[in-house]
Amino acid sequence: MQPPEFSDDFRRQFRELLAWRRDVRRFRRQPIDPAILGELLSLARLAPSVGNSQPWRFVLVEEPVRRAEIRDVFVRCNEAARATYSDARAALYGQLKLAGLEAAPCQLAVFADEATSAGHGLGRHTMPETLHDSVVAAVHTLWLAARAYGLGVGWVSILEPREVMRVLDVPKDWSLVAYLCVGYPEEEHMDPELERHNWQERLADDRVVVLR
């Protein structure tokens, strides 16, 4: 089979896909077609992984009781995080919407299976963190795929991982990498919400690209 040749138009659209990927917190309650969700998970599994270990484990959180417990964990963690700021920064933090747990039709917890035998440990003896990095790559792949289907993804990081593991009753060898809200966004913006609300501007190239 011959490898595909990507056109200039495709490359332009790919850049637009990257530019329009947003961390969404405001969702419509419209359900996601199960076939589309299945395709997103299938595409996520095309991500690269160290030693072809494929350590990602996806947990669809659908039970209302478990969702309510996750939201309680978020509320506690969010209050604790807000207490670490002071003055104007604390006030701004309090105005930010930092999760879409109330409305997102799909909630997805993504774990790394620390005990996986797949890949036979290749590449992980010197850099074991690449197991988690592989799961992050799958999350980003899903994020872009969702955008291509008109869906938004919100990564909820204000959660205590051990509490999430307890609520979802997952194997002890799994570790939480991401808790995602997925759904159709209420609004579309070219700029990130945290940039729009003056929390953090995008860094210039010379801040992040270093020559040696």
Image: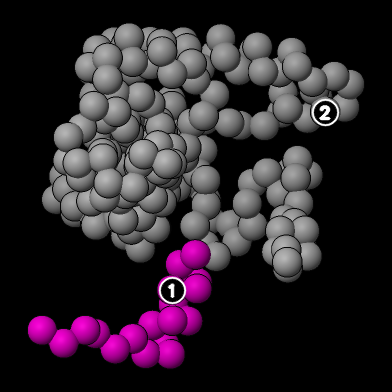
For image coordinates 27% across by 14% down, the residue present is: 172
13 in relation to 93, above or below: below
User: Which of the image's four quarters has the C terminus?
Assistant: bottom right
Q: Is residue 56 above or below residue 152?
A: above
Q: Is residue 152 visible?
A: yes
Q: Is residue 125 left or right of residue 23?
A: left
Amino acid type at mark 1: Phe
Kindly identify the amino acid type of the residue bearing the numbered disc 2: Arg
Q: Tell me where residue 124 appears, x and y as whole percent.
A: 35, 41
Q: Residue at x 72, y 23 (%)?
A: 94
Image colouring: one colour
Above or below, 128 against 146 in this view is above
Q: Main secondary structure of the magenta part?
A: helix
Q: Is residue 146 visible?
A: no
Residue at 37%, 90% in the rendered image: 7
Camera-nearest residue between 9 and 178:
178
According to the image, label 1 marks what residue?
14
Instruction: Compare residues 95 and 123 and report the one nearer the observer.
Output: 123
Q: Residues within 10 Å of mark 1 (few under 14, many from 20)?
A: some
The residue singled out by tag 2 in the image is: 89
Q: What residue range appears in magenta?
A: 1-18
The percent coordinates of residue 19 (x first, y second) are 55, 65
Horizontal and vertical percent position of residue 175: 35, 24
Q: Is residue 17 magenta?
A: yes
In the image, farthest residue toward the front: 126
- Helix, strand, or loop for circle 1? helix
Q: 25 or 138, which is in the foreground?
A: 138
Q: Residue furthest left?
A: 1
Badge 2 element: helix
